[in-house]
Image (spheres, rainbow, N blue to C red):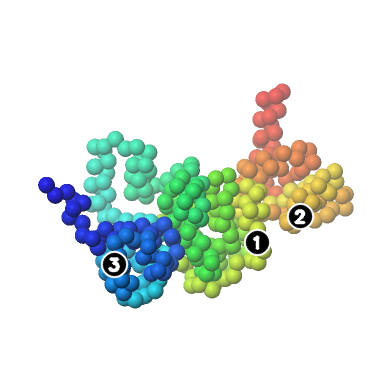
Amino acid sequence: MTGWQDRISTGERRSAVLLAALIDARRPLSRSELRPLVPGYDADSATASLQMDDDIALLRSYGLDVDWNGPGCETVAIRVPAWQHRPVELSETDRRLLEQAASLATLDSVGTDAMRAVRGEPLPPEADTTISLSPRGSAARGRPLAYSRLHRLVWLADRGATAGFGYPDATGAFQPRQLQVAGLGESRGVWYAVGFEPGSNTMRAFAVSEMLGPVVEAESPGTYEAPFGFDTAEYLALSWRLGPDPVPARVRFDADLAVYVSSMLSHIKLESLPDGSVEASVSVGDIEDFVGWVLSFGTHALIVEPAEAAARARQVLAMMVTRHG
C-alpha cells in the first residue's frame, strides 16, 4: 500500500527543504547559496535554476509571501510581513461553534488562552518571553507571537517607519498605539520597544509580549530618525521607567547623597538646591517600582511628586512599622 510520503512529488520535497532553508536564514539567499542546501537539484546549473524557479512558484501558490522578481531572480527571501502571526477574522457563527467545541474538550493552558483571545479578552502577560534576534538559542523559549513582533519592530526601526500595534490601557482594554522605535532591549526576561509616540517628547516603553495583533507600518519609512547614541540598556536598567504612559515625577536627595546620586544618575536631569540637596525630574512608568526604588535610599530621599507615589510610600512605610513594631 502506498503511503502519503510516496505521493509527494520531487518538486514538493525540494520546495519543503527550500522553505526550511529560507526560514533558517531569515535573510535573502542567493541561488548559489541555496543550491547546496537543497538536495535534488540537477548538476547542471541552468537546469537547477529552472527547478528552483518552479519550487518558488509552488511556494507562492500556497500563499507564502516570497520576495522574488520572477524566473532568474538572483536572490530569494520570505517577505517580512510573512513572519507575523495575523489574527483570524471570525464571524459570530465561527465564535459560537468554537465555544461549543471548547465546552466538549478539556483545554490546557494554551487552549484556554486561545479561547480567551477568541472572546476578545485580554491575555495574561507571558511568563517566558526570553527571546533574541537570532532564530536559534534562547528564541526557542520565546513564544512565536512575541518573536515575530520583535523582528517586525527591528525591521521598521531600521527604516525609520513608525510602528503601530494594539496595547492594553490602565483598565486592561486594548487601544491602538504608535511608536517611533528608538531601541529594543531585554529587562528581567521581557523584551521592550522603547521610543516616542508621534508628536510626543516623552520616552515610552512597551512590552513586546503584551502587544496585540500584528505590528504594522503606521507611517512610511523615513518618517523619523532614531536618536543618536541612545543607550537602550541604560534606559531599561531603571525598571520604574518601563510603561506605556509615564507620569512626571520628582525625587529629592539630601546633601549626604548629592554627590553619589549625581554620579549614579548622570544621565538624568538634576537640579542643585541651596541646601546642598539635588532634585531629579524623571518620567515614571511603574509607580510601584518607583516607590520601592526611592525607599531603598532610606531617609535620604523624598518623593516630591506625584502625590500618588508619595501616598504609596507612606502606606508601605506604615505597613513596615506595623509589621516590625
Front one among 64 and 12: 12
Q: What separation in Å lies between label 1 and label 2 (alpha carbons)?
A: 14 Å
Foreground disc of the pair 3, 1: 3
Give the side of residue 92 with respect to residue 22, left or right.
left
Residue 42 is marked as 3
Query: Tags 1 and 2 in contact by the CB under 8 Å rule?
Result: no
Name which quarter of the figure residue 11 lies in.
bottom left
First along the sequence among labels 1 and 2: 1
Q: Which residue is mark 1?
A: 230
Name which quarter of the figure residue 18 lies in.
bottom left
- Image x and y of residue 101, in percent: 24, 42
Q: What separation in Å lies between label 3 and label 1 (alpha carbons)?
A: 50 Å
Q: Which residue is mark 2?
A: 266
| Quarter of the figure with the C terminus | top right
Using a 10 Å C-alpha cutoff, classify the residue at mark 1 as few (fewer than 14 neighbours), some (14 to 19) or many (20 or more). few
Residue at 48% of width from left, 42% of height from top?
127
